[in-house]
Amino acid sequence: MAVFRRGRVYWYHFTFRGRRIQESSGFQNKTAALRVEAKRKADLLDRRGGIPKLKLTPKFDEFVKTFLEWSKQQHRPKTHELHAGNCATLKRFFRGKWLDEINHGMVEDFKLARAREKRWGDEKGSAVSAVTVNRALSTLRLLFHYAERCGFQVSNPVKHVEFFGETGRTRIITLEEERAYLATASQPLKDIARVMLDTGMRPEEVFRIEVANVDLDQRTIFNPFGKTAAAKRKLTTTTDVFAIVQRRAINSNSKYIFPSPDNLERPIASVRKAHDGAVRRAQIKPVFRLYDLRHTYASRAVMAGVDLPTLGALLGHTTIQMTMRYVHPAEEHKREATMKMEKFKAVSAIKLAEKSQMVTTISATVQ
C-alpha cells in the first residue's frame, strides 16, 4: 500500500491493470486513509467505483484500431481513408492518454498546435489549413461518439470546441479563368472539369460514372451513389457533356467512363496533380480547388434564373440551406443587381411624380 500526505490530507496511489490510480482519501488520519484505499481497490475489482461494469476505458491509440475497423465497414473507401489519415495525426498528440482522460482543454491545445504546424512537403512552409484541422476534429468527435456507443463511460471533449471558419476557401472561377484552365488541362482532367462545370456533379461522382448509367437516347447520366437519397439522381446533359460521355462510352474498354489508367476495373481515383499543373500553367491566382467547379456551376445556375429547389435537386442536396452554401454571386452579378435596384427606384420616383402632378392638375381643374 502506498499512502502519502499532501498538505493535511492523505492520498493513495497504486496501479490497477496497467492504469495508475492516484486520489485523495479525504482524511487526515492515516489509518482511515488506508481503509479508503482498500475499499477503492475492492470496488475496482468488482468493476465499480466509476469504471464501467463490462468494459474498462482503453487508451486512445488502442481504441483507434477498433474505430478504424468499424469505419472500414461503415464508410466509403475515401471517407475511411480520410479518418485513417486523421487518426495518424491525432495519435501524435493523444498517444498514451486514456480516453476518459482527454478533455476539452486538450482538444483546444491540439487545435491550436495543429494550426501552427507546417504542411508536409510544402517548400514554402505554409501552415496547415483550417479545413485540415476541422476534418481532424470531426474524426475525433466521431471516434468519441463511437466510444460512447461501445459502452465506455466517456464524455465527448469535442462537443464544445469551436471549429475554424472555412468560408474563405471557396472560389468561383470566371469565364476567362475557365478558358485558360481548360486550354492547359490534360486529359482526362479536361473532360472531368467540363462535366463538373455543366452538371455540378461532385468529383467522385464524375470519377465513378458507369457506361451502364449513361442513357444516350435520353441524354442523361444517372448517379446511384451518395450518402442521402437526394444524392442519387438523374441529370440531363448539356451538348458538350453529352458529346464527352458519348465518345467515352463508345470507346471505353471499361465499365467506367473515366477508368483508372492502372486498372480498368476501377474508376480513376484522383486528378489532383493534373489540376494543380493546369492551374499553374494557366497562371490563375488565387488558385482554386477542383471542387470549386461545383460551386461555380451552382452560382452560374442562379444567375441564369434557376430556382433554389430545382438547383438543390440538381446538386443532390436534401435542404435549401445546404444549397445556399453553394451560391456565391460574382461581383459582376452584384453590380447588375445594384443597377436593377437603382433603375427600380428611378422608375418608382417618376411614377410617384407623375401621380402627384396628375392629382395637382385634377385639383386645379375642379377649383
Image: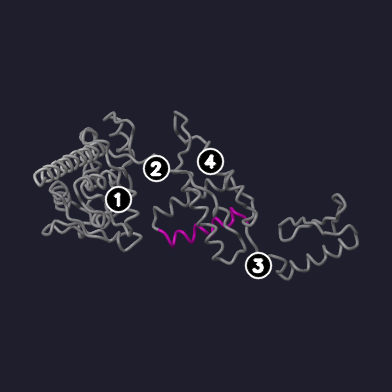
| Residue 65 in magenta stretch | yes
Circles 2 and 4: CB atoms closer than 8 Å: no
Quadrant assignment, res 16:
bottom right
Quadrant assignment, res 11:
bottom right
- The type of residue carrying mark 2 is Thr
| Mark 2 or mark 3, earlier in chain | 3
Mark 3 burial class by Cα count in 10 Å: few <14, some 14-19, many 20+: some
Q: Which residues are magenta?
A: 59-75
Q: Secondary structure at mark 4?
A: helix
Q: What residue did someone put label 3 on?
A: 52
Estimate the spatial distance between the alpha carbons at disc 2 and disc 1, rounded to whole Å.
Answer: 18 Å
Q: What residue did someone put label 1 on?
A: 202
Estimate the spatial distance between the alpha carbons at disc 3 and disc 4, rounded to whole Å.
Answer: 33 Å
Q: What residue did someone put label 4 on?
A: 114
Estimate the spatial distance between the alpha carbons at disc 3 and disc 1, rounded to whole Å.
Answer: 44 Å
| Mark 4 or mark 1, earlier in chain | 4
Q: Is residue 81 left or right of residue 60?
A: left
Q: What residue did someone put label 2 on?
A: 167
Image coordinates of residue 68 in percent, x first then y, are 49, 57
| Mark 3 or mark 4, earlier in chain | 3
Q: Residue at x 47, y 46 (%)?
A: 134
- The type of residue carrying mark 4 is Arg
